[in-house]
Amino acid sequence: MVEYVIEKWSSEIFTVTIGATKEEGGTRNKTIKIGGQKTLPFLNCDGVIPYKPIIAAEVIDYLPEELWPTFYEHFKDIVSDPIKWIKEIEKSEPDVICIRLLSCHPDIKNNSKDYLSTFIPEVLKTTQLPLIILGCGHIEKDTEILPFVCELTKNEKVLIGMAVKENYKTIALSAFASGHSVIAETPLDINLAKQLNILINDIGIPLDRIVMHHTTGGLGYGFEYCYSIMERCRLAGLQGDKVMATPIINLISEEVWKTKEAKVKPEEEPNWGKSTIERAKIWEISTALGYLQAGADILVLSHPDSIKSLKSIIKNI
């Protein structure tokens, strides 16, 4: 008689909370929890998965046409106004809204705190969903603006990003002081990811206030390597490495919509299909599905159809 042995993991992934309701001191209409897994993705029979992965809809406060040309062309009536964009994307029923403050980048609009003092409160009034707020990707400018964003959103339990090795002290401490959690971003290297988590934890930030981002790659553009790093992190966390037992976020849309497959016109590549926007949606959904299986806790998407498709899949997990 053959006996089957189910391996029991020795640890679980930390639970991180995003969003605070009125009763909790915030203004959001709900609280979202991520993490808490005691097993690998889709292996519910082996353990407990208390909180399913969530979908965040990305809204960029200023989207240059050349950045995501296909997306811009298809949604040109709304992408010029981030407040209108938020209202429209909410119709696809994402779990949270992810705001990227790209206009603050010195090479784009170089918007300052004066702009944020008006824009961030307007965002808070426009949506009651929990929020993820990302900087502009410029280390020095993010170090300047993100602490201010933390103050403007105090007690809303926002997920703030990105904290990198050059500015993690300022951003992580500002986020924690305002009741928020922080995204720790590193290149695709498990040792660098662990090191940054340790550094952030050492300055007094609990591990249940940290979410990892491994510089997500799009399908065909570093996807396989990112998948393997995520898998190794999740295995380490479940096997007892507390520093690696933090949830993971993947910024799918920012990688997918700039790829060749999402931009090339049908007349240039007739064998790729008749619709660039449909091809791009497939690229976004396929990339997200892969990371879902790797252990992603937050998938950041942009196209309403992609959001609806992934929501439907996650619902049936």
Image: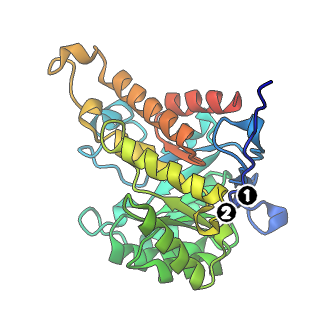
Taking 174 as reference, is 264 left or right?
left
In the rendered image, the vertical position of residue 61 relative to residue 162, given as above or below? above
Q: Position of residue 253 (x, y in %)?
A: 42, 43
| Along the line of sight, the residue nearer the viewer: 30 or 52 | 52
The answer to whether the residue labelled 2 contacts the one labelled 1, judged by CB atoms less than 8 Å apart, is: yes
Percent x, y for residue 222? 33, 45
Q: Residue furthest bottom?
A: 203
* Residue at point 36%, 39% (across, down): 256
Q: Residue at x 47, y 78 (%)?
A: 168
Residue drawn where x is 58% and y is 53% of the image: 234
Farthest residue, direction left: 268
Q: Earlier in the sequence, mark 2 or mark 1?
A: 1
Give whichever of 83, 154 is nearer the camera. 154
Amino acid, disc 1: Ser
Q: Is residue 157 above or below residue 126?
A: below
Residue reaching furthest to the front: 1
In the image, residue 311 above or below residue 276: below
Mark 1 residue crowding within 10 angstroms, few (<14) / some (14–19) / many (20+): few
Tag 2 residue: 240
> Horizontal placement of 86 versus 106: left or right?
right
The quadrant the C terminus occupies is top right
Mark 2: which amino acid? Gly
Please state, as top left, top right, bottom left or bottom right, where the N terminus lies in the image.
Answer: top right
What mark, if any, has residue 10 been given in the picture?
1
